[in-house]
Image (cartoon, helix red, strand yellow):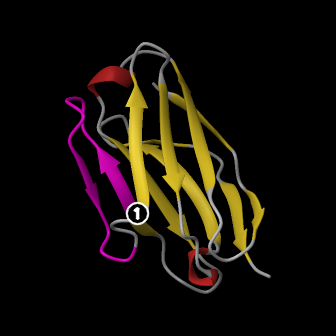
């Protein structure tokens, strides 16, 4: 099973940027589609972005053009570059290995002035 640990969250002003990282350990990382989800207070968890083993990425409409997902299979890492952040991006962000079913513990992102 893949173990996932997120990092890189924090407090940022509107219009700012953050880069989230997800470190994976265990077997099977490179064959997994990797996903970033987020959950805001009082809302359901939503899929933000995903990237398959071949590097093809998809995004939620709400983040398209602002967020970029990437992966480094040699380092067992997946990233989420978030630019032009808005207050509505405030949430706990979770890394997920789709085929393995593993989840990280989440990292808080707060966008506020």
- Looking at the rendered image, the quarter that the N terminus falls into is top left
Residue where numbered disc 1 is placed: 48
The structure residue drawn at horizontal position 53% and vertical position 62%, both measured from the top left corner, is: 83
Seen in the picture, residue 111 relative to 58 is either above or below; the reply is below
Magenta part of the chain: 48-62
**What percent of the width, then of the height, locates residue 55?**
24, 34
**What percent of the width, then of the height, locates residue 66?**
43, 65
* Displayed quadrant of residue 90: bottom right
Judging depth in this view, the residue of 8 and 25 nearest the camera is: 8
**What percent of the width, then of the height, locates residue 73?**
39, 19
Position of 11 with respect to 68 (left or right) is right
Seen in the picture, residue 103 relative to 23 is either above or below; the reply is below
Determine if the magenta segment contains residue 60.
yes
Specify few, some or many for label 1: CA neighbours under 10 Å numbering under 14, 14-19, or 20 or more: many
**What percent of the width, then of the height, locates residue 19?**
60, 48
Determine if the magenta segment contains residue 46.
no
Circle 1: element type? strand
Q: Residue furthest bottom?
A: 42
The structure residue drawn at horizontal position 59% and vertical position 39%, both measured from the top left corner, is: 21
- Looking at the rendered image, the quarter that the C terminus falls into is bottom right
Judging depth in this view, the residue of 30 and 19 nearest the camera is: 19
Position of 85 with respect to 64 (left or right) is right
Position of 10 with respect to 20 (left or right) is right
Seen in the picture, residue 98 relative to 47 is either above or below; the reply is above
């Amino acid at each position: 099973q893949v173990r996932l640990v997120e990092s890189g969250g924090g407090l940022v002003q509107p219009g700012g940027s953050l880069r989230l990282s997800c470190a994976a350990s265990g077997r099977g990382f490179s064959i997994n589609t990797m996903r970033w989800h987020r959950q805001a207070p009082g809302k359901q968890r939503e899929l933000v972005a995903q990237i398959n083993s071949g590097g093809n990425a998809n995004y939620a409409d709400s983040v398209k053009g602002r967020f970029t997902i990437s992966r480094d299979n040699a380092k067992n890492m997946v990233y989420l570059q978030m630019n032009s952040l808005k207050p509505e991006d405030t949430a706990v962000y979770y890394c997920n290995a789709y085929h393995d079913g593993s989840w990280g513990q989440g990292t808080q992102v707060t966008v506020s002035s």
